[in-house]
Image: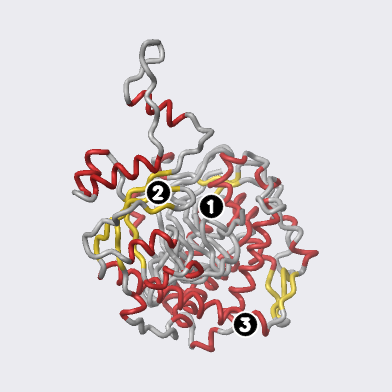
Amino acid sequence: MKFKKVAAALLAAVMISSSAAGCGSKIDANAAAATLDGKEIPMGVANFIAQYQAVQMDSYFLSYYGEDMWSSDSGEGTTMTESVKEDVMENLQVLYLLDAHASDYDVALTDEEKEAITQAAAKFLEDNTQEALDTMGATQETVEEMLRLNTIQSKMHAAITEQIDTKVTAKESAQKTFSYVRFEKKDESDTSADDEESENTGTDDADTDSEPVEAKDSKEEAEEFLDEALKDMDKAVQAGGYTVLSCSFGAGDLKEEDNTTTLDVAVLEAADKLKNKEVADSVIETDDAYFVIHMDDTNDKEAAKTKKESILSKRRTEKYDEVLESYKKDCEWKVNESEWKKVNFDELYTVKTPETDQTTNDTTADDQTGTDDSTADNQTGTDDGTAGDQTGADDSTADGETGADDSHTGSSTADDGTEGSTADDQTGDSAADDQTGADDNSDDSAADGETGADDGGADGESGTDDTSAED
């Protein structure tokens, strides 16, 4: 798997669980990690973003992979270290490209945003042990730079995606919604269904006088259910204890290549022929199941609203990706491999949550030093169009905080994970699904706190959790 999770929201209380001989001592913060059109990207910033990503990776995956996690296979033929570093570098390119082109959209930081960033960075340094800060390469300048880039990225996403055509016709968004009961086809080699049927019918294996009851074929069961459903679907469902699911679809979904639902087109085509409140008079068969379907609404207005938003989200994704690709095409980006190879994640990080430290002051959680409503959600990434986690700049309004949360860090072992104070921050061209790196999608709604140039703004905080670190 590809990891795309560099943090936008600062986890204020970070510590290391092994001795910090440290990455920091090996890195020349003033050296160039890469160059963009001749401008040097400092190793200090690049290393801090990479190490901050490692904090979250350790928090989420250390208990699963163990202390050798960074040398583990990422699932793509590379180690987790290599995968994360690749994605961080891709993210850096996008962040600095957006920064370089900010004037194209009259994007700039306000004095209030600059002050919030300065305070957030100072708070981060105050709340961490010097050992952790040294290992991460965290200084006032490097932390401020990451937060500045996050904020610029979010505001750029909002500005770029404002240029889309927001007109969606009724024909484009029209949706029909139907409900269905699915009967999985049984694997002939699987006897578990027969065993279950025997249990349900009270067959006792010890009773040699009893004749075993043969389990029904899926199609036979579906047909028997249909007979009752044609009389009254609700009663048939209740009597059989079946699970009813629903699906909304539009005219475009009837084409295999354009189908956005999870169901086969054959099922949608059958549903498309039904009138309101009508049950299909035959069982619909696909490769792996049988379906009995009922048309709920041939003009589902709520589903149409959702479809409209999906269409707009897709347009935002396409617009953002189009602009980014044009920037990449016209730039000269070169990674300084000799410096970048020095970055590693040998020192393991842990973050202590409020539940494990009673000294946390609960009143500080509401104190935000974050950006106001004119600032997008301070990610270093946007995530758009991806299933489940969608991100996007939400009309330039910030959900992110640069302020304090209530976690408190102390001594812990490498297995101590992160809970409440960790963020779903992601990185990449459009980070998604808890991954680090570039994702090609963007969305119109604020999302899971990502960092990096995700294709949408984010719910990531550009501030610090109000926590303190102990050695």
Frontmost residue, 303 versus 221: 221
Image mark for residue 128 = 1
Taking the spot 73% from the left edge, 55% from the top edge, the residue there is 25
**Position in image of residue 63 (x %, y %):** 56, 39
Taking the image as shown, residue 432 lies to the left or right of residue 80, namely left
Disc 3 and disc 2: Cα gap in Å? 49 Å
* Residue mark closest to the camera, 3 vs 1: 3
Image mark for residue 188 = none
The kind of secondary structure element at disc 1 is loop
Taking the spot 49% from the left edge, 74% from the top edge, the residue there is 317
Q: In which quarter of the image is the C terminus?
A: top right
**Position in image of residue 169 (x %, y %):** 34, 82
Q: Name the residue under label 2.
A: 290
- Specify few, some or many for label 2: CA neighbours under 10 Å numbering under 14, 14-19, or 20 or more: many
The kind of secondary structure element at disc 2 is strand
The kind of secondary structure element at disc 3 is helix
- Specify few, some or many for label 3: CA neighbours under 10 Å numbering under 14, 14-19, or 20 or more: some
Dot 3 or dot 2, earlier in sequence: 2
Residue type highlighted by circle 1:
Asn
Residue type highlighted by circle 3:
Tyr
Taking the spot 33% from the left edge, 48% from the top edge, the residue there is 181
Taking the spot 74% from the left edge, 63% from the top edge, the residue there is 340
168 over 454 or under it: above or below: below
Frontmost residue, 345 versus 104: 104
Dot 2 or dot 1, earlier in sequence: 1
Taking the image as shown, residue 6 lies to the left or right of residue 237, namely right
Disc 2 and disc 1: Cα gap in Å? 58 Å
Whether residue 287 is visible to the viewer of this picture, yes or no, is: yes
Residue type highlighted by circle 2:
Tyr
Frontmost residue, 222 versus 463: 222
Frontmost residue, 381 versus 324: 324
